[in-house]
Amino acid sequence: MKTLKILPALLLTAFFCSCASEKARYVESGGARSVITVKKINMADWNAAAAELVNNMLASNAFAKINAPLPLKMKVSRVANRTSDMIDTDLLTTQITIALQNSGKVSVLSDDQYSQELAKRKLNGAEILPDITMSGKIIELRDSDEDTNEVTYVFFLELNYNSTIVWQGQKQIAKQSDKGIFGW
């Protein structure tokens, strides 16, 4: 009888002990110890997409095909979000523009209004126009069967010069998870 009285207390203690959190720790952003989930785009996904797209862009020789001196002035246009989540596409485009600027092939025009006004004043009211624009979209595809959930994120980017696409690239990232007892 005593055991039956103690059992709920032991179960309750075990439950609360299992809910205790570990101490926080630093991990490499997007690295092997980062949390990976099929529920959203993780930092590892942003890093992989940006790296592959910028490497393909630079390897394609697209910048040499444009009849303008380097570094080309580039403006980031719209990157459409076709996923089920609110995402900040700057996590992709900023990594890419940093790499392109560091390559010496591109100079990215600022979106900052004060910077634009200052440039206009220095140029006697003339606006600095980009040589090229970069645009794209991110698409999410979800699928599942009896045991597995899968999500694929497709990252599309393109460079445009005089309304003509001079480069296109895509990176697909697919992730799977086993279904739990209650489905997703």
Image: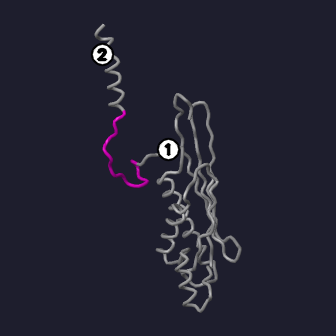
* Residue at x 49%, y 74% (from the top left corner): 101
Q: Residues within 10 Å of mark 1 (few under 14, many from 20)?
A: few
Q: Position of residue 19 (x, y in %)?
A: 37, 34
Quadrant position of the C terminus in the picture: top right
Q: Which residues are magenta?
A: 19-33
**Marks 2 and 1: which is nearer the front?**
2
Q: Position of residue 93 (x, y in %)?
A: 54, 65
Q: What residue would you read off at disc 2?
A: 6
Say if 91 sits above or below 58 in the image: above
Indicate how the structure is coloured in the image: one colour
* Residue at x 32%, y 26% (from the top left corner): 13
Say if 5 sits above or below 133 in the image: above
Residue reaching furthest to the bottom: 124
Is residue 20 rendered magenta in the image? yes
Say if 101 sits above or below 93 in the image: below
Q: Give the amino acid at mark 1.
A: Thr
Q: Give the amino acid at mark 2.
A: Ile
Quadrant position of the N terminus in the picture: top left
